[in-house]
Amino acid sequence: MKKQDDLILIHAPSIYDFRKLPIMHGPISDVVPSTPIFEMYPIGFASLSEYLERKGFQVRIINVAMKMIKNPDFDVEALFRRLKPRAFGFDLHWMPHVQGSLALAEMAKQYHPSTPVLFGGLSSTYYHEDLISNYPFIDYVIRGDSTEEPMARLLRAIREGKKPQDIPNITWREKGQIRVNPLTYVPDTMNHIAIDYGHIMKKVVKYRDMTGYVPFTNWLEYPVTAVFTCRGCSYNCRTCGGSAYGFARYANRKKPAYRAPELLAEDIFRVCDHLNAPVMVIGDIYQAGDDYGERLLATLKKRRLKNHIAFEFFKPPSREKIARIAECVENFNFEISPESHDEKVRHAFGRYYDNEDLERMIADALELGCKRFDLFFMTGLPYQTAQSVLDTVEYSRELLERFGQTRRLYPFISPLAPFLDPGSEVFENPEKFGYKFFYRTVEEHRQAMLSPSWQYILNYETKWMTRSEIVYSTYEAGLRMNRLKKEFGLIDARIADETDQRIREAVAMMKRIDELVAEDRKNAGQGSLYALKDKMEKLNISTVCFKKELEWPTHFIRMNFLKILKTILLPDKPNIQPEETE
Ligand code: B12
Ligand code: SF4
């Protein structure tokens, strides 16, 4: 007989009814691999699955968002009717999933009233009491950035029919009373867990379910992966819910938990053994100090990897550091987010380097062989006006004039959207930073997600820009940036022209939605909006830039099938600190 799953982890679409509802999502996901439905599940699903299996539990992941995107007729209710695990887990990690995660959790409870429903992730951690108080179909919220061990203990308690009063990090309900167990399980390293893509491959075979495990829509064509240097952050970008400030306040994390650089290098090797695609190293490798970066690079140097390895930086590294990367990694790409060309805006946002540092880094990186350099700018920042947004594009022109000849420098601009992060310094002290919020509670955010356009979904505006100004300056900047990229040969002229056309149509659509909303405030123009649904759908992807622009070079044959087969057939060998295997 088939063994019952102890836990099924479900990743919901951002909006459950996205296939029916007319919503102009806008460029909210243009610079991440997902569509605006945010089909990517938290990488923590992978570490949870591996850890819990190691502790004797059977865990399945189902990316319901992906299944709904891939198959327009996919019947979610039929799926829930069929599933019979001991517990359902839903991520509410990113706040934009609030509507979809709650809708699916309610459905799970409706079909399986006695099966516990669990929530986890950063937004769940921030809103744990709101969730448990106001949504009776949620039984437990597991708080914190490292839930592997508390989850193992909770699943054991569920199996044995016991109460979780002694399990850290759990918020739960007992006879109508809310119980908030202390958030004390905050490990100081990431060496006991593994983000093991081999484990995921095995699961795909076990459940014969590729779409349930695929992280984003075109992953099979572009199988980019990520490895993680840490959980938490030592920086304090003002709008970031994953900042030192945010983690300390709501996740009880006083300093980042790093992964030993040797383990991280092995994570990279394992990916490269299986996939001929880029690997993104999440978190600045020099955040933990120069020694950390050096240990990682020295280990990477032992293998001449062909894959492109992408490094992100929170501040520009010195020329020596870049030279060391060039020495150890054959194909290296960089990305950095100066957010604005205006140093006053950048500093107010919490990034303290100036343009001279940035330009020096670009010059060094390109000279020392960086294959591709991505620069990310953002709209919706402190002190940033609509004019300042457009000036950022002008600054990008200056950079391309200086550094654009080899077509390796790519500037991007996108909005801080759809929500400014709960738990960030700005969210907690809006007035201090010149912000105003329209939504604060879970329910307010849930309702907001159903608004007809991203202008009404945005949860904030600033002293310097209204929501409407944020929206239209973003489109205008996107339009200009796209033309710039065409001019400097960064994108094919035909694609640039299509993007140009799409941005102009998106602006017209946004204006039409504004009119409908103004005509019919009460129903937000719902009836007439449905007539625009098909058109909106076409405008919701690659809105201010062409999504493929984000892709780093890949090998023609992207997977090592022989190696994958071998991994699937052999038992799991998690890449963790040796003492953790006992
Ligand atoms: C890496 C990263 C990404 C990667 C995603 C990698 C991935 N698949 O997880 C990329 C670049 C794709 C990304 C995209 C986005 N991101 Co991001 N991202 C981060 C970053 C830098 C690190 C995340 C991290 O370390 N996670 C590690 C830990 C914390 O999470 P985890 O291992 O995945 O999961 C553990 C716990 O969270 C928990 N857990 C999670 N889910 C569940 C479910 C259950 C049932 C349980 C029990 C536990 C549980 O247990 C896990 C294991 O211990 C953080 C900033 C930061 N410093 O944290 C922002 C951050 C998480 N992202 C954020 C945002 C807003 C986004 C976007 C919405 C931005 C956008 N508009 O495009 C998108 C969403 C994309 C999607 N879902 O499709 C915000 C979230 C704020 C909020 N509360 O909503 C953060 C905090 C900061 C920021 N602004 O960038 N992101
Ligand atoms: S945005 Fe800033 S605070 Fe947030 S994770 Fe990145 S560097 Fe850290």
Image: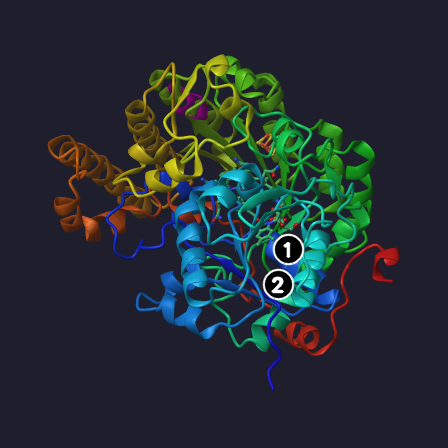
Give the residue displayed 59% in from the left and 17% down from the top.
Answer: 354
Residue 304 seen: no
Residue numbers of the magenta segment: 391-396
Residue 452's quadrant in the figure? top left
- Please tell me the numbered disc located at residue 275: 2
- Compared to residue 298, the image places residue 83 above or below, namely below
- Compared to residue 260, the image places residue 556 above or below, namely below
Indicate the position of residue 379 as horizontal and vertical percent values. 41, 26
Q: Give, as a three-letter code, the residue at label 1.
A: Asn
Q: Is residue 395 magenta?
A: yes
Residue 383 seen: yes
Going from the N terminus, do you reach mark 1 or mark 2 first?
2
Q: Residue 287 vs residue 63: left or right? A: right
Quarter holding the N terminus is bottom right
Q: Which callout, 1 or 2, points to the residue nearer the camera?
A: 2
Q: Are marks 1 and 2 in contact (CB under 8 Å)?
A: yes
Q: Main secondary structure of the magenta part?
A: helix
Q: Give, as a three-letter code, the residue at label 2.
A: Leu
Q: Is residue 50 magenta?
A: no
- Mark 1 sits on what residue? 307
How far is the residue under mark 1 from the one under mark 2? Answer: 8 Å
In-front residue for pair 522/517: 522
